[in-house]
Image: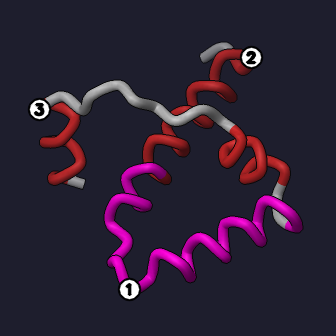
Amino acid sequence: MNLTIAGPIMEAKAKERLYHLVDLIPDAEIHAAERYLEYLTEHGDPFIRRLMDAPFDDEPVTDEEEGAVQEA
């Protein structure tokens, strides 16, 4: 695999996973999660900061993608 392409692909997959995880956060924990992510963006890993600055993926989830998430 071309390493110049692998980085962005891996970042995109990690970002998709983070969006999915955010959707699963219970309502009672939303504010705690928000504070933690804000902490990471200010003090954490540069990779996490880039993910937080990335635009929201508003592309609809396909049935195939939803099935893959359920299997994981």
Which element carries disc 1, helix, strand or loop?
helix
Which badge, 3 or 2, is on the more N-terminal residue?
2
Q: Is residue 66 left or right of residue 23?
A: left
Vertical position of residue 30 compared to residue 40: above or below: below
**Which residue is denoted by mark 2 in the rendering?**
4
In depth, the one of 2 and 21 nearer the eye is: 21
Q: Is residue 46 left or right of residue 12?
A: right
Name the mark nearer the viewer: 3 or 2: 3
Specify the segment rendered in magenta.
Answer: 19-43
Quadrant placement of the N terminus = top right
Which badge, 1 or 2, is on the more N-terminal residue?
2
Name the mark nearer the viewer: 3 or 1: 1
Please rate how many residues cluster around mark 1, counting C-alpha atoms within 10 Å: few if below 14, some from 14 to 19, many from 20. few
**Which residue is denoted by mark 3 in the rendering?**
63
Quadrant placement of the C terminus = bottom left
Query: What residue do we see at 65% from left, 25% from top?
Result: 8
Residue 61: percent from left, percent from top: 24, 32
Query: What residue do we see at 11% from left, 32% from top?
Result: 63
